[in-house]
Amino acid sequence: MSTRLYLAWLVAIIATLGSLYFSEVSHFIPCTLCWYQRILMYPLVIMLGIASFRQDPSVIRYALPMTVLGVLFAGYHYLLEKIPGFAGPNPCRVGIPCDYEWINWLGFITIPFLSLVAFTIITAILLKSRPA
């Protein structure tokens, strides 16, 4: 249990530092959907960190809804980027468009993809860590 919480915390730290690197060092401007994902990821660093040190599995009931929402936002964002003319509602009407790809490594790795992977890993760890 404790190792899993530490691992989830580590993934949240890496995701948070990665997003801060992209915006503060590389000067990529986050779109609206990027901000929603940040709003869901950043508190996980604090929540999972405290829970890891306190060995408190009750954090799962609070963190899991945030990670599931993060998976949904990141997955939707990735679809907006990768499917031309995706007809879903687009919250990015002002500022940076949500379908703008700041990075595109190997043809499929974009910032929303990295976010999706991080939220999915944390969700899987939390689901595996639930008390029986």
Image (tube, rainbow, N blue to C red):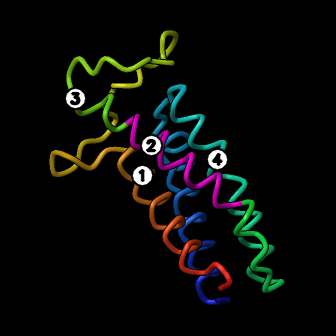
Image marks 3 and 1: residues in contact by CB distance under 8 Å: no
How much space separates mark 3 and mark 2, taking CA atoms? Answer: 14 Å
Compared to residue 114, the image places residue 54 above or below, namely below
Q: Secondary structure at mark 4?
A: helix
Q: Which amino acid lies under the numbered mark 1 shown in the image of this protein?
A: Leu
Image marks 4 and 2: residues in contact by CB distance under 8 Å: no
Q: Which amino acid lies under the numbered mark 4 shown in the image of this protein?
A: Leu
Image marks 3 and 4: residues in contact by CB distance under 8 Å: no
Q: Main secondary structure of the magenta part?
A: helix
Q: Position of residue 116 (x, y in %)?
A: 42, 52
Residue numbers of the magenta segment: 63-77
Residue 52 is one of the magenta-drawn residues: no
Residue lying farthest to the top in this orientation? 94
Compared to residue 82, the image places residue 93 above or below, namely above
Q: Which mark is residue 116?
A: 1
Q: Secondary structure at mark 2?
A: helix
Left or right: residue 84 compared with residue 27: left
Q: Quadrant of residue 48?
A: bottom right
Q: Residue at x 44, y 18 (%)?
A: 90
According to the picture, the residue beneath numbered tag 3 turns out to be: 83
Residue lying farthest to the left in this orientation? 107
Q: Which amino acid lies under the numbered mark 3 shown in the image of this protein?
A: Ile
